Every structure is written in C-alpha cells, then in structure tokens.
Amino acid sequence: MSSACEQLTEVASAGVSPALRAVDCVANEMASAAFGRLFGAEGAMAPVLTILLTLYIAFFAISLLTGRSSLGISALTPRMLTLGLVLTFATSWIAYQGVVWNLAVGGPDWIASQLMGAKGSATQIFGDRIDVVFNAIAEASQNAGQGGGEAAQAATEGAAPAKAAAAGGGAAGLFSPDSVMWMGALMLLLGTVGVLLTARIALAILLALGPIFVVMALFGGTRGLTAGWLRGVVLTATTPLFVVLGGGITLELLVPIVSALVQGAQLGEIDGRAAMALFVVAAVHLALMGMVLKVAGTLVSGWQVFGLARSETSRGGRDSAAPPAPAVSVGGQVQPFVPAGTASRTPAVSAASAAAMAAAPAMEQGAAPQQGDRRTVITQVSGGGIEPLGASQASRTRGIGSRFRASNDVNSNSTGRAAAKETFK
C-alpha cells in the first residue's frame, strides 16, 4: 500500500467523507496490482492469453476451410474489432484505467454533480453533509446527557424510588427520545454510508477481475460471462448515483429535524417529536435504498450488452416462428392460411390452384359464362395429399370439367385432374 493510501486509511474513521476517499484509493491500488499480476509483463495469465489467441485464430482458419466463414468485410470487421479491444484492455493498464475505471467510477459521480449543481465530487460533498448531520446528533445527545445527569443523581438518593424505577422503567428506556434518535441515526447510517461503501467495494472487486472477463469475449460460448460482468459493473457503478441523489433529498428533510433536536438538547432534554421524525425519515430512506437496488437490477437485466447477451426466449421465438403461408386467391375466393403442421401438403394444394387458374383462359375463349355463374375449386386435403372426390361427384363432373380444358394443357391434364376436381356452375 502506498503512503498516500496509508494516510487516508489512518483517518478513515474520522467520518464518512474520509472513509470514501480511503476506499477509492485502496480500490484503485488493488485493481492496478491485480492487473499486473494477471496480464502484466510477468503475469500469471500471460501464457493463457497467448494460448487463447492461438485457439481463436485456429478456429477462424478452420471455419474458413470448412466454408462456414468468408474473407469479406462483413466477416472480418467484427472479429478484428473484438480481437483489438481484447488485446488493448487485457494488456494495457493505462487503457483499462482510462476507459473502464474512469467510466465506472467517475462517470456516475460526474452525472450526480451536474444534476445537483455541485462543484467537485458530488459523492464527497454528500459524505461531508452526512458528517455534519451525525455531528449534530452526537452533540444533541451529549448535551441532553449533561442536562439529565443532575436529575439522575437526585433519583439515586432514595433506594426505594430507584428500585421502582429500575423495575418498571426498562421498557420505557428502549423508547425514550434519546434511544429513538440513535436508532434513527443508525438506520440513516446503514442506508447511506453502508450502501455507498458496499457498492464501491463490490465495484473494485469486479474491476480487479475485469481483464479475465474481457478475454472471455473472444469465444461465443463464454461471451455470456463477459455480458454478466458488464452488467455487474454497471449495477455497482450506478448504485452510488441513486444513493447520492436520493440521500440529498433525505438530508434536506432532516435539516429542520436536526435543528429541533439541537435546540431541545440545549434545554436539557431531547424533543420526542423530533426524535420520532428522525426515525421515520431514516426508515423511509432505508426503504428507498431497497427500492433503488431493485430498480437498478431491473434496468441492468434488460440491457443486451452490445449484442453479447441475447435472451434464449427471443432466440427460440425467432428461430421457431415460421411465417404463415400466403393466402391463395382462386376465382375471387381467398383460401385460409395453411397451418405450420400442414406445410408439407401445401405443394399439392398449390398444384390444384395452378391447374384451375390455367383453365380460366380457355373458358374465356370458348364461351362466356353467364353473369350469375361462378366457379368454385373443390379441394379436400387429408393425410398429406388431396383426397379424391366421391364417386357420385366424379360422375357428375366428368364431362363438365373437360369442356373447359385449355388447349395447351393436354399433356398435363391427367396430373391436374389427379390433384383437384373443378366444378363450374
């Protein structure tokens, strides 16, 4: 650990803002050391990276030999971009720190500063304001304790009154204004500093392991791990943003409450209403942080991660969903869509329709139909083919169908009649 981080660590217990500075410094140093031990000049994972790059090029060569890929711009461009990004972020700490680390740590802080109109780091300013609130609460408790010391000393002069108070005042001590005030302060501490420090430590661990997951983006079977890592980084990076924005509103609500506590403590007692208000606001803020974590997780889960992660549902729906067969219009009547299960029987129905449409010009050349006449193509599909008509229907339509036969379709007449029977009324 460097001397600068040691100095920050020594004063980390002085408040929230020093603790955040110490965590950021230690996290940056830990990520840099982990990067050097993994993929540095003498890193343990450098031979592994060489083997993986060799396999990546070998797999691409095999796909070219087998015809699954081609030497074109559309095939080479995404592969070359993936290979270049992996080599850049897995072998250069300067590039990794300048892009990944600064975006994950400094990006949400900059957005919070712009939204709050603050000059400097919004997270550090938020930590300073929390320190002011807790210092005021501690001062109010101390003043109230000094004012109530004389009353407690007077109460201990009589043994019987003291025993009675000890026997019956235990439950009242848990819900005294001072106890309620400190319970509210503890909940506020967990909802602000606890969430901030937890998110920063988790982000530091993910960024320290980042080069391993960057290398996994080379192969399709491991890109899901890279997508999950990026989602985790975004989740832990945006959590402090929501904490700072939500905590800023909470601190604005606590200003008059803490002022009432300080004024009451100067008179020798803590205002019970102000203590209860502090407890309620802290509970609401703690519930808000739980909701923030839920919302952040929902937002990140819907991210496709630049196409690296596609849901299996969308893949299955896109692969299995087949477009419905187009409607066949014969003689002014639109046939219904053919289901996917009867797709194998569609060619037979299409042949019957083609035969009926081929017979239409001959009918126009031979004799003009009456105005009230209409033509109907009867096709009955059953068991993968066209079911022949009944014997009575065949005898009635045997002479009528041949009357309107096209002259250029004599050779294929037997095939057309086997596919469908035509009746013109």
Image (tube, rainbow, N blue to C red):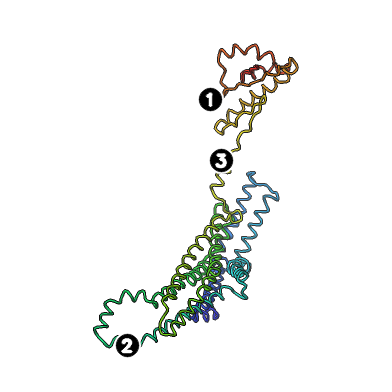
Using residue 161 as the reference point, say whether residue 9 is left or right of it.
Answer: right
Q: Where does residue 153 sit, x and y in percent of width and height?
A: 32, 88
Circle number at residue 320: 3
Disc with the residue nearer the chain's start (1 vs 2): 2
Q: Residue at x 47, y 67 (%)?
A: 284
Which label's residue is closer to the chain start, 3 or 1?
3
Q: Nearer the viewer, residue 284 or 42?
A: 284
Residue at (61% x, 74% y) in the render: 118
- Residue 112 coordinates in the image, percent (x, y): 59, 69
Position of residue 57 measured from the top left corner of the image (x, y, whole percent): 62, 53
In three-dimensional space, the C-alpha distance between marks 3 and 2, rounded to whole angstroms, equals 83 Å
Which amino acid type is shown beneath numbered disc 1?
Gly
Residue under label 1:
383
Mark 3 nearby-residue class (10 Å; few <14, some 14–19, many ≥20): few
Image marks 3 and 2: residues in contact by CB distance under 8 Å:
no
Marker disc for residue 153: 2
